[in-house]
Image: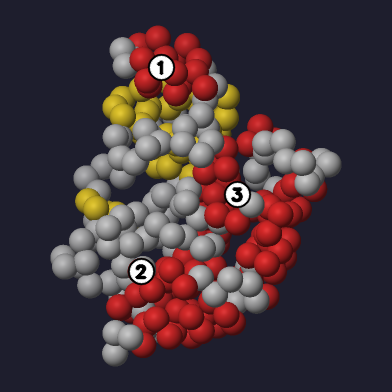
Amino acid sequence: MRTVVATRYVTPLREGGSLPAVVEADDDGLYVLKFRGAGQGPKALIAELLGGELARVLGLPMPELVFALLDREFARTEPDPEIQDLIRASEGLNLALDYLPGALNYDPAALRPDPALASAIVWFDAYVTNVDRTARNTNLMVWHGKLMLIDHGAALYFHHDWEHAGGASASAFPRIRDHVLLPYASAIAQADAELAPRLTDAVIDAIVARIPDAWLQAEACFDTLDAHRKAYADYLKRRLAQRAGFVEEALRAHAAYL
Protein backbone atom coordinates (compact mmCIF):
# COMPACT_ATOMS: atom_id res chain seq x y z
CA MET A 1 0.00 0.00 0.00
CA ARG A 2 1.09 3.54 -0.73
CA THR A 3 1.49 6.24 1.89
CA VAL A 4 0.50 9.83 1.13
CA VAL A 5 0.80 13.02 3.16
CA ALA A 6 -2.38 15.06 3.64
CA THR A 7 -1.71 18.63 2.54
CA ARG A 8 -5.12 20.33 2.44
CA TYR A 9 -8.43 19.83 4.23
CA VAL A 10 -11.11 20.22 1.55
CA THR A 11 -14.45 19.49 3.18
CA PRO A 12 -15.99 17.33 5.91
CA LEU A 13 -18.35 14.50 5.02
CA ARG A 14 -20.87 14.78 7.82
CA GLU A 15 -22.25 11.26 7.58
CA GLY A 16 -22.41 9.08 10.68
CA GLY A 17 -20.39 9.87 13.75
CA SER A 18 -16.84 9.62 12.47
CA LEU A 19 -16.64 12.85 10.42
CA PRO A 20 -14.49 11.61 7.53
CA ALA A 21 -13.22 14.33 5.24
CA VAL A 22 -12.14 14.91 1.68
CA VAL A 23 -8.48 15.93 1.70
CA GLU A 24 -5.83 16.66 -0.89
CA ALA A 25 -2.50 14.84 -0.62
CA ASP A 26 1.05 15.41 -1.73
CA ASP A 27 0.43 13.37 -4.90
CA ASP A 28 -2.25 15.95 -5.91
CA GLY A 29 -4.95 13.31 -5.45
CA LEU A 30 -8.16 13.67 -3.48
CA TYR A 31 -8.98 11.12 -0.79
CA VAL A 32 -11.69 10.38 1.76
CA LEU A 33 -9.72 10.38 5.00
CA LYS A 34 -10.80 8.22 7.93
CA PHE A 35 -9.44 9.69 11.17
CA ARG A 36 -7.76 7.50 13.76
CA GLY A 37 -9.08 9.78 16.52
CA ALA A 38 -12.75 9.44 15.52
CA GLY A 39 -15.59 7.15 16.51
CA GLN A 40 -14.32 3.76 17.61
CA GLY A 41 -10.74 4.83 17.04
CA PRO A 42 -8.02 2.65 15.54
CA LYS A 43 -10.17 -0.49 15.55
CA ALA A 44 -12.42 1.06 12.91
CA LEU A 45 -9.35 1.72 10.76
CA ILE A 46 -8.14 -1.85 11.24
CA ALA A 47 -11.53 -3.12 10.07
CA GLU A 48 -11.38 -0.71 7.11
CA LEU A 49 -7.89 -1.88 6.21
CA LEU A 50 -8.50 -5.61 6.54
CA GLY A 51 -11.94 -5.47 4.94
CA GLY A 52 -10.78 -3.33 2.04
CA GLU A 53 -7.67 -5.34 1.28
CA LEU A 54 -9.54 -8.66 1.55
CA ALA A 55 -12.13 -7.28 -0.88
CA ARG A 56 -9.37 -6.23 -3.27
CA VAL A 57 -7.78 -9.70 -3.21
CA LEU A 58 -11.19 -11.19 -3.96
CA GLY A 59 -11.53 -8.96 -7.01
CA LEU A 60 -14.39 -6.89 -5.60
CA PRO A 61 -14.66 -3.26 -6.75
CA MET A 62 -12.97 -1.04 -4.17
CA PRO A 63 -11.42 2.44 -4.29
CA GLU A 64 -7.69 2.31 -3.65
CA LEU A 65 -6.77 2.32 0.03
CA VAL A 66 -3.73 4.32 1.16
CA PHE A 67 -2.12 5.21 4.44
CA ALA A 68 -2.38 8.96 5.05
CA LEU A 69 0.02 10.90 7.27
CA LEU A 70 -1.55 13.80 9.11
CA ASP A 71 0.26 16.64 10.87
CA ARG A 72 -1.50 18.31 13.82
CA GLU A 73 -0.73 21.70 12.20
CA PHE A 74 -3.25 20.64 9.56
CA ALA A 75 -5.91 21.84 12.03
CA ARG A 76 -4.84 25.49 11.85
CA THR A 77 -6.82 26.26 8.70
CA GLU A 78 -10.03 24.58 9.92
CA PRO A 79 -12.38 26.96 11.81
CA ASP A 80 -14.61 24.25 13.34
CA PRO A 81 -13.32 23.43 16.88
CA GLU A 82 -14.74 19.90 16.71
CA ILE A 83 -12.81 19.17 13.54
CA GLN A 84 -9.69 20.81 14.97
CA ASP A 85 -9.84 18.42 17.94
CA LEU A 86 -10.40 15.46 15.61
CA ILE A 87 -7.36 16.35 13.52
CA ARG A 88 -5.12 16.80 16.55
CA ALA A 89 -6.27 13.47 17.97
CA SER A 90 -5.42 11.81 14.65
CA GLU A 91 -1.86 13.04 14.22
CA GLY A 92 0.24 10.41 12.49
CA LEU A 93 -0.93 7.52 10.34
CA ASN A 94 -4.53 7.33 9.21
CA LEU A 95 -6.37 5.56 6.39
CA ALA A 96 -7.85 7.03 3.23
CA LEU A 97 -9.77 5.89 0.18
CA ASP A 98 -9.43 7.29 -3.30
CA TYR A 99 -12.14 9.93 -3.76
CA LEU A 100 -14.63 9.04 -6.50
CA PRO A 101 -15.82 12.33 -8.06
CA GLY A 102 -19.42 12.18 -9.23
CA ALA A 103 -20.17 8.89 -7.45
CA LEU A 104 -23.73 8.43 -6.20
CA ASN A 105 -25.12 6.42 -3.32
CA TYR A 106 -26.44 3.08 -4.49
CA ASP A 107 -30.20 2.96 -4.97
CA PRO A 108 -31.60 -0.58 -5.37
CA ALA A 109 -34.47 0.81 -7.41
CA ALA A 110 -32.11 2.41 -9.92
CA LEU A 111 -29.57 -0.35 -10.53
CA ARG A 112 -30.07 -4.11 -10.57
CA PRO A 113 -26.64 -5.64 -9.85
CA ASP A 114 -25.21 -8.64 -11.64
CA PRO A 115 -26.13 -11.79 -9.64
CA ALA A 116 -22.52 -13.01 -9.59
CA LEU A 117 -21.25 -9.71 -8.17
CA ALA A 118 -24.13 -9.44 -5.70
CA SER A 119 -23.42 -12.99 -4.52
CA ALA A 120 -19.71 -12.30 -4.12
CA ILE A 121 -20.39 -9.18 -2.06
CA VAL A 122 -22.91 -11.01 0.14
CA TRP A 123 -20.39 -13.84 0.69
CA PHE A 124 -17.65 -11.37 1.52
CA ASP A 125 -19.80 -9.38 3.95
CA ALA A 126 -20.85 -12.59 5.70
CA TYR A 127 -17.20 -13.58 5.99
CA VAL A 128 -16.13 -10.27 7.55
CA THR A 129 -19.40 -9.93 9.52
CA ASN A 130 -20.19 -6.57 7.99
CA VAL A 131 -23.37 -5.25 9.61
CA ASP A 132 -23.38 -2.10 7.49
CA ARG A 133 -24.57 -2.96 3.98
CA THR A 134 -28.32 -2.62 4.50
CA ALA A 135 -31.05 -0.77 2.62
CA ARG A 136 -30.86 1.94 5.30
CA ASN A 137 -27.10 2.34 4.92
CA THR A 138 -25.83 0.58 1.80
CA ASN A 139 -22.17 1.65 1.92
CA LEU A 140 -22.16 1.14 -1.83
CA MET A 141 -21.48 3.80 -4.41
CA VAL A 142 -22.24 3.84 -8.13
CA TRP A 143 -19.35 5.25 -10.13
CA HIS A 144 -19.41 5.25 -13.93
CA GLY A 145 -22.31 2.83 -13.75
CA LYS A 146 -20.48 0.31 -11.55
CA LEU A 147 -20.86 -0.62 -7.90
CA MET A 148 -18.02 0.30 -5.54
CA LEU A 149 -17.64 -0.96 -1.98
CA ILE A 150 -16.86 1.58 0.74
CA ASP A 151 -16.81 1.79 4.54
CA HIS A 152 -15.88 -1.43 6.32
CA GLY A 153 -15.25 0.15 9.72
CA ALA A 154 -18.19 -1.70 11.30
CA ALA A 155 -17.01 -5.10 10.05
CA LEU A 156 -14.99 -7.62 12.11
CA TYR A 157 -16.81 -6.56 15.25
CA PHE A 158 -15.35 -9.55 17.10
CA HIS A 159 -12.28 -7.43 17.90
CA HIS A 160 -14.30 -5.37 20.36
CA ASP A 161 -14.46 -8.49 22.55
CA TRP A 162 -11.26 -10.50 22.23
CA GLU A 163 -12.23 -12.75 25.11
CA HIS A 164 -14.92 -14.37 22.97
CA ALA A 165 -13.18 -14.10 19.58
CA GLY A 166 -12.65 -17.86 19.39
CA GLY A 167 -16.35 -18.58 19.33
CA ALA A 168 -17.14 -15.58 17.12
CA SER A 169 -15.33 -17.14 14.15
CA ALA A 170 -18.05 -19.79 13.88
CA SER A 171 -20.95 -17.31 13.80
CA ALA A 172 -23.53 -18.00 11.09
CA PHE A 173 -24.05 -14.22 10.94
CA PRO A 174 -27.86 -14.15 10.79
CA ARG A 175 -27.79 -10.40 10.11
CA ILE A 176 -26.94 -11.25 6.51
CA ARG A 177 -30.72 -11.35 6.02
CA ASP A 178 -30.66 -7.52 6.08
CA HIS A 179 -28.10 -7.22 3.25
CA VAL A 180 -29.24 -4.84 0.54
CA LEU A 181 -27.97 -7.11 -2.27
CA LEU A 182 -29.33 -10.37 -0.88
CA PRO A 183 -32.41 -10.44 -3.19
CA TYR A 184 -30.06 -10.51 -6.21
CA ALA A 185 -27.53 -12.98 -4.75
CA SER A 186 -28.60 -16.11 -6.59
CA ALA A 187 -25.11 -17.59 -6.89
CA ILE A 188 -23.83 -17.69 -3.30
CA ALA A 189 -22.63 -21.29 -3.51
CA GLN A 190 -20.67 -20.50 -6.68
CA ALA A 191 -19.20 -17.39 -5.02
CA ASP A 192 -18.06 -19.55 -2.11
CA ALA A 193 -16.35 -22.01 -4.44
CA GLU A 194 -14.59 -19.24 -6.35
CA LEU A 195 -13.62 -16.83 -3.56
CA ALA A 196 -12.57 -19.00 -0.63
CA PRO A 197 -9.50 -20.52 -2.39
CA ARG A 198 -8.11 -17.03 -3.01
CA LEU A 199 -7.74 -16.39 0.72
CA THR A 200 -4.73 -18.56 1.40
CA ASP A 201 -2.92 -18.41 4.73
CA ALA A 202 -0.12 -16.46 3.04
CA VAL A 203 -2.56 -13.89 1.64
CA ILE A 204 -4.24 -13.40 5.02
CA ASP A 205 -0.88 -13.12 6.81
CA ALA A 206 0.32 -10.52 4.30
CA ILE A 207 -2.79 -8.38 4.72
CA VAL A 208 -2.74 -8.55 8.53
CA ALA A 209 0.97 -7.63 8.53
CA ARG A 210 0.00 -4.21 7.14
CA ILE A 211 -1.71 -3.16 10.37
CA PRO A 212 0.46 -0.30 11.70
CA ASP A 213 1.88 -0.60 15.20
CA ALA A 214 0.20 2.68 16.18
CA TRP A 215 -3.26 1.24 15.52
CA LEU A 216 -2.82 -1.73 17.85
CA GLN A 217 -4.14 -0.49 21.17
CA ALA A 218 -3.04 -2.06 24.43
CA GLU A 219 -4.98 -5.28 25.01
CA ALA A 220 -4.36 -7.25 28.19
CA CYS A 221 -4.64 -10.55 26.34
CA PHE A 222 -1.63 -9.83 24.07
CA ASP A 223 1.97 -9.61 25.22
CA THR A 224 3.33 -8.27 21.92
CA LEU A 225 2.16 -6.48 18.79
CA ASP A 226 3.00 -9.57 16.75
CA ALA A 227 0.74 -11.65 19.00
CA HIS A 228 -2.02 -9.09 18.48
CA ARG A 229 -1.64 -9.28 14.70
CA LYS A 230 -1.51 -13.08 14.81
CA ALA A 231 -4.86 -13.10 16.60
CA TYR A 232 -6.42 -11.25 13.67
CA ALA A 233 -4.88 -13.67 11.18
CA ASP A 234 -5.94 -16.69 13.23
CA TYR A 235 -9.51 -15.42 13.41
CA LEU A 236 -9.72 -14.84 9.65
CA LYS A 237 -8.34 -18.30 8.94
CA ARG A 238 -10.75 -19.96 11.37
CA ARG A 239 -13.62 -17.96 9.93
CA LEU A 240 -12.76 -19.23 6.47
CA ALA A 241 -12.42 -22.83 7.63
CA GLN A 242 -15.81 -22.60 9.38
CA ARG A 243 -17.57 -20.81 6.55
CA ALA A 244 -20.17 -23.53 5.96
CA GLY A 245 -22.28 -21.96 8.70
CA PHE A 246 -22.43 -18.48 7.20
CA VAL A 247 -22.78 -19.81 3.63
CA GLU A 248 -25.77 -21.91 4.64
CA GLU A 249 -27.28 -18.96 6.51
CA ALA A 250 -26.90 -16.71 3.45
CA LEU A 251 -28.44 -19.36 1.18
CA ARG A 252 -31.36 -19.76 3.59
CA ALA A 253 -31.87 -16.00 3.80
CA HIS A 254 -31.80 -15.62 0.01
CA ALA A 255 -34.35 -18.42 -0.40
CA ALA A 256 -36.90 -16.22 1.35
CA TYR A 257 -36.95 -14.05 -1.79
CA LEU A 258 -37.74 -16.92 -4.16
> Which secondary structure, mark 2?
helix
Compared to residue 223, the image places residue 245 above or below, namely below
Residue 2 visible within the image: no
Q: Earlier in the sequence, mark 1 or mark 3?
A: 1
Q: Earlier in the sequence, mark 2 or mark 1?
A: 1
Q: Position of residue 4 (x, y in %)?
A: 51, 30
83 or 27: nearer the eye? 83
Q: Are marks 3 and 2 in contact (CB under 8 Å)?
A: no
x 73%, y 48%: residue: 229
In space, the residues marked 1 and 3 are separated at their CA atoms by 27 Å
x 51%, y 29%: residue: 37
> Which secondary structure, mark 3?
helix
Q: Is residue 218 left or right of residue 27?
A: right
156 or 59: nearer the eye? 156
Q: Is residue 86 left or right of residue 138?
A: right
In the picture, the quarter occupied by the N terminus is top right
Q: In which image quadrant can residue 238 be found? A: bottom right
Q: Position of residue 115 (x, y in %)?
A: 33, 79
Q: For the image shown, how many numbered marks are present on the structure? A: 3
Q: In which image quadrant can residue 231 be found? A: bottom right
Structural crowding at the residue carrying mark 3, measured as other residues with C-alpha within 10 Å and reported as few (<14), some (14–19) or many (≥20): few
221 or 246: nearer the eye? 221
Q: Which residue is mark 1?
A: 84
Q: Which label is found at residue 178?
A: 2
Q: Which residue is mark 3?
A: 160
Say what amino acid the circle numbered 3 marks.
His
Q: Position of residue 230 (x, y in %)?
A: 76, 53
Q: Which-is-in-front pick, marks 2 and 1? A: 2
